[in-house]
Image: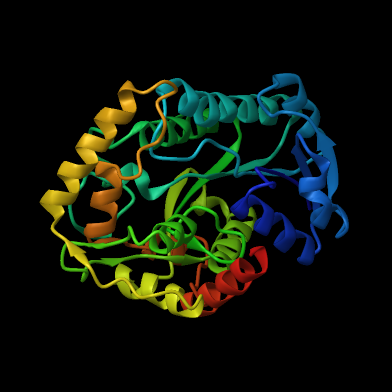
């Protein structure tokens, strides 16, 4: 099978492109800087330079491929709506249009469980439990991208969306790096009682899920799937495990949730007034994410994608820590 993997210069896209090559697939990748893809090119990936925001490039990339795994997108909790709409909605529209025009059979879309988040505790969230309002621009535009995806079914495109939670492994630059930096500055604190349980996803489990989505039979099509390791863990226990592996002090200081939200509100307000609207050190969304229980029901993925969640989180954390030490 020949596939296009978008976003392969990033953590998830890059790890899946490598996994797909190891499974014997022909893999095409794209981006602005070829050096970011050298590890994939050495393993046999075909690299095409360019920006996926260019519809003509998207058409070219989708020529002669059977499936697309769309991992590219705008991420973050801060920024203007236009940035997230361009990176998540418009980019997805370009990929969908190219798939339809070039006769691509299947499009697997990397979405996010951030669309569920409303600042409250949730355990065992099912795919249909999408709130009426979204917590930030990222969540809203990821959901809009899903809607565009599912709308393409009527034109014959086979589509699936995956919503993986807290993906962990070597190459992750979003979950733990910020906490590590804050702890080195002695600014990291446990928000609330520190007992909140959350889902994580080993990158190896996500690779299995994406691969399963490429091969899934007709009953699996047209659906969104929660993906996690299926075993919620206390967030701050996991954070302290990583800090121990990196020989950093444990987090022990507690800050009440109310105080943390007040500080975040002040920080957001100040940054909104500054030139360039720099990202605050603490946001209300981050406070809620770090203090709430949040887990997913993955039974639909188990049923339709033959998803086993067979990889434990701990080796993925060890893998991240070894990689982080090498980065210096």
In the rendered structure, the answer to whether residue 63 lies left or right of residue 10 reads: right
Observer-nearest residue: 108 or 253? 253
Observer-nearest residue: 251 or 131? 251
Could you tell me residue 178's position as x and y percent? 44, 55
Could you tell me residue 51's position as x and y percent? 72, 28
Locate residue 29: give its quadrant. Answer: top right
In the rendered structure, the answer to whether residue 189 lies left or right of residue 280 reads: left
Could you tell me residue 265's position as x and y percent? 20, 37
Locate residue 217: give its quadrant. Answer: bottom right
Check the picture and name the quadrant holding the C terminus.
bottom right
In the rendered structure, the answer to whether residue 66 lies left or right of residue 305 reads: right
Residue pictured at 32% horizontal, 60% vertical:
188
Observer-nearest residue: 287 or 134? 287
Residue 83 appears anywhere in the view: yes
Residue pictured at 29% horizontal, 42% vertical:
283
Tally the marks: 0
Locate residue 43: give its quadrant. Answer: bottom right
Residue 234 appears anywhere in the view: no
Could you tell me residue 145's position as x and y percent? 47, 32
> Is 150 located above or below residue 194 in the figure?
above
Observer-nearest residue: 305 or 93? 93
């Amino acid at each position: 099978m020949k596939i296009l993997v978008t976003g392969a210069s990033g953590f998830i896209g890059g790890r899946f492109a490598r996994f797909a090559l190891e499974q014997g697939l022909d893999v095409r990748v794209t981006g602005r800087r070829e050096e970011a893809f050298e590890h994939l090119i050495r393993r046999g990936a075909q690299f095409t330079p360019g920006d996926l925001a260019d519809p003509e490039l998207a058409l070219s990339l989708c020529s002669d491929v059977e499936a697309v795994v769309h991992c590219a997108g705008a991420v973050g909790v801060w920024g203007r709506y236009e940035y997230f709409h361009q990176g998540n909605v418009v980019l997805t529209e370009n990929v969908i249009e190219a798939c339809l025009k070039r006769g691509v059979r299947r499009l697997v879309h990397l979405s996010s469980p951030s669309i569920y988040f409303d600042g409250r505790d949730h355990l065992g969230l099912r795919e249909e439990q999408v709130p009426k309002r979204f917590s930030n621009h990222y969540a809203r535009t990821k959901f809009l991208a899903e809607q565009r995806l599912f709308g393409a079914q009527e034109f014959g495109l086979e589509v699936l969306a995956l919503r993986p939670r807290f993906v962990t492994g070597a190459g992750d630059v979003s979950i733990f790096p910020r906490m590590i930096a804050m702890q080195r500055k002695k600014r990291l604190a446990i928000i609330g009682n520190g007992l909140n349980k959350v889902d994580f996803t080993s990158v190896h489990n996500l690779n299995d899920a994406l691969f399963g989505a490429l091969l899934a039979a007709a009953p699996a099509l047209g659906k969104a799937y929660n993906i996690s390791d299926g075993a919620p863990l206390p967030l701050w226990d996991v954070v302290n495990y990583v800090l121990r592996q990196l020989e950093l002090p444990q987090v022990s200081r507690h800050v009440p949730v109310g105080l943390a939200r007040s500080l975040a509100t002040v920080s957001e307000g100040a940054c909104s007034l500054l030139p360039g609207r720099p990202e605050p050190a603490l946001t209300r969304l981050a406070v809620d994410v770090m203090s709430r229980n949040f887990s997913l029901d993955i039974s639909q993925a188990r049923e339709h994608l033959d998803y086993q969640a067979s990889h434990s989180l701990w080796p993925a954390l060890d893998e991240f820590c070894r990689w982080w030490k090498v980065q210096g």
